Amino acid sequence: MPILLSLEIVQNNTATDILKTEIASGSAPDLIGPVGIKGRAGFAGQFLDMTPLIQNAGYDMTQYPAKLVDTMKDGQTGALLGIPYAVYPSYIFYNKDLFDEAGLKYPPQKVGEKYTMPDGSQVDWNWDTVRKIGMLLSVDKNGKDATQAGFDPASQTQFGFEFQWTEGRRLASAFGSGSLVGPDGKTAQFPDVWNAGWQWYYDGIWKDHFIANDTERNSDLLAKGNSLSSGHVAMGHMFQWYICCMSADVTKAGAFKKWDIAVMPANSAGVTTAPINIDTFTISKGSPVPDRAFEAMTYLVGRLDLMALYGGTPAVGDQLKFFHDVVDPTFAKQFPGNKVNWQVAIDMEGFAESPNHEGEMPNYIKAQDDYGKVFTTLSTKQGLDLNKTISDMVTTLTGDFSATP
């Protein structure tokens, strides 16, 4: 029997409130999406676990990397709330022009490859290596880099690294998977690998001077926050969705000529983690026709022509062909002749963090606001006792979690 879809389109900034109203009135849509993990947060218990539907339909989940499937699961219950649809992997962007100018080797494009330092030594591609070459790529107005005596951080004209448009959990997850929510589901925590990540970031700004502080980041030099597009940042953590914003005008040449992407660095334990943004469809828990909703969902997920219109990267099919056919043409005028190794982006999907950095937590809006305010201070306040700052934040979040509306 044919399935008739009744389409309801809502604005992003009102979608949450509208869905809450529809759920409360018993008129929630059967199928909701495309929606990101953050977009479905705050609706704990409202979406169907798709595991039985997948089993009943015999739907092939082996076509997806296991890490992507794990990302679709509820961090507390393990329920599978969707199947991967549009993926936005993250990786390291690097400006070839600046690397060439400094005489440095490019970062690795395969996990496990070594990086060749200026003295010829082969070292692990980890966050400590990023720090070292990031300092070499940070330059003041007199041409001194951040490793040299007399370097003036107050007159920097170039920075070695940037976490483009980041936030606290997203940045922390680049150093390893974790969650603000403890195993009991109501006590806040801050994993050691996240603490290390925040400390690395903080030291990079105020001690080693290869990352811009908030004032520098929002200056004209760094394109008022769109730092990677400025041509004055050598490397950065970047998500696939950022490709829309590499230049202010996609019909004109960018601020630099050549760039490419590299794999994520490993943490101190040798573990590589690539935070990911991912869109999916969810099915309302109260849907009277979950089987039909699932059938409609799998049809939509399989339409790669619709994916091109939507603007994401498909989680299935010939992804490399999609990059060459759909993504590369968007850069033809901005970066003529530049070739990007998109296989790196595809490979990074297999290193997605789990749980996802946008995952559910109690009292979601309040908790997100509270930890967000603390994270902002890392780029605005020098001299913080970061361990105390984090400890105080965890106490605040525990209070938020216990006050869940």
Image: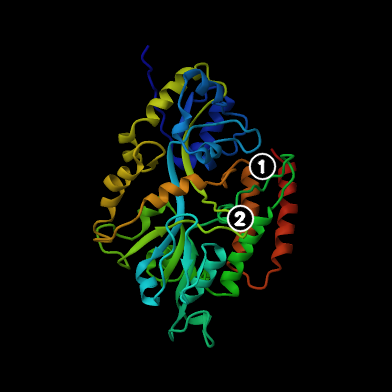
Rendered location of residue 389, percent (x, y): 71, 62
User: Residue 383 appears in which quarter of the rendering?
Assistant: bottom right
Rendered location of residue 283, percent (x, y): 51, 26
Work out whether 15 lies above or below 248: above
Q: Is residue 290 left or right of residue 307?
A: right
Distance (Cα) linking label 2 and label 1: 14 Å
**Circle 2 — which element?**
helix
> In the current view of this chain or complex, which residue is farthest to the top?
1
The quarter in which the N terminus is drawn is: top left
For the point 36% across and 59% down, the residue is 246
Q: Which residue is mark 2?
A: 372
Visible in this render: residue 138?
A: no
Task: Work out whether mark 2 precedes mark 1 in sequence or the reverse, and give the earlier one.
Answer: 1
For the point 54% across and 40% down, the residue is 71
The quarter in which the C terminus is drawn is: top right
Work out whether 334 lies above or below 135: above
Work out whether 205 lies above or below 14: below
Q: Which residue is mark 1?
A: 363
**Circle 1 — which element?**
loop
For the point 41% across and 66% down, the residue is 106
